[in-house]
Amino acid sequence: MYLNRILTTTAALALMAGVAQAQTATKPAKAPAAAVSTAKSTAAPAATAPAGATAETAAAGSAQIVAAGDIVATAKASGQFTTFLKAAEATNLTSLLRDNKNLTVFAPTDAAFAALPAGELDKLMLPENKAQLQKVLIYHVINAKVPASEFKGATRKAATVAGPSVELAGGATLKVNDAEIVQSDVMATNGVIHVVDKVLMPPGAMAAVNSAVSASATTAAPPAKEPSTLPATQVMPKTK
């Protein structure tokens, strides 16, 4: 199906200290049986996990992402995407992710960036690799809303803003390329966030990064330009 064209761009737990309670010399009175029964019947129900959470993320309540405005505001509020947001700011992509509508972002957590092979993140964040870092980031963005329902039970491809497509697999575990979608369908005001456990790398990205590092002593890399528009992208038909 054809996806909508996006508008042109314009623009981390406080610690809880446990305080020991002084024990009193007097043994507290035993509560009447009726009072105990009433307390049990009025106990608050257990909180439920947000929609789109997997069993793994449901077990770790702090891992849940809750929509808190636009994509950038939601990512900031969660406290789990500081590297992603820092990289977006460094490559002039913050306003794009904040102001454009109907985006899909496969958002790698800080843990996903930390899991990159030794040295890769440092190389990506070098000034001479600004353009390549930008390409890596927009490889995580689709210029249309693609909720999990669009690919559950099927495998399909979707073109990214970077150009190359990603493969969406909707089996028992939702995946994009080789990354697991650990929480799907976080509905921000301007699009949908799928939280992923790996950084997606477009073809040849690290080769270009290494080449730029080698050449940096003699040639200054051109600054990354903020995209003036997002290209319309297309999700390919489902394949069984």
Image: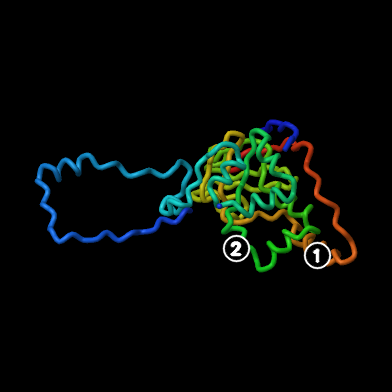
Q: Nearer the viewer, residue 104 or 69?
A: 69
- Where residue 79 sits: x, y (%)? 55, 50
- The answer to which image quadrant residue 39 occupies is top left
Q: Nearer the viewer, residue 54 or 72?
A: 72
Give the side of residue 55 with respect to residue 132, left or right: left
Which residue extends farthest right? 218
Relative to 182, say whether 114 is above or below: below
Q: Crowding at label 2, few (<14), some or many (≥20) Cα neighbours within 10 Å?
A: some
Q: Crowding at label 1, few (<14), some or many (≥20) Cα neighbours within 10 Å?
A: some
Q: Residue at x 16, y 40 (%)?
A: 38
Q: Are marks 1 and 2 in contact (CB under 8 Å)?
A: no
Relative to 146, say whether 139 is above or below: below
- Where residue 22 sits: x, y (%)? 24, 60
- Identity, as a three-letter code, of the amino acid under mark 2: Ala
Disc 2 target residue: 115
- Where residue 129 sits: x, y (%)? 78, 58
Relative to 215, say whether 141 is above or below: above
Image quadrant containing the C terminus: top right
- Identity, as a three-letter code, of the amino acid under mark 1: Val
Q: Residue at x 32, y 44 (%)?
A: 46
Disc 1 target residue: 213
Q: Secondary structure at mark 2?
A: loop
Between the residue at mark 1 and the residue at mark 2, the CA separation in whole angstroms equals: 21 Å
Mark earlier in primary sequence (1, 2): 2
Residue 160 is tagged as none
Give the side of residue 108 with respect to residue 160, left or right: left
Q: Residue at x 69, y 67 (%)?
A: 119
Image quadrant containing the N terminus: top right
- Where residue 161 sits: x, y (%)? 72, 43
Q: Secondary structure at mark 1?
A: helix
Q: Nearer the viewer, residue 118 or 33?
A: 33
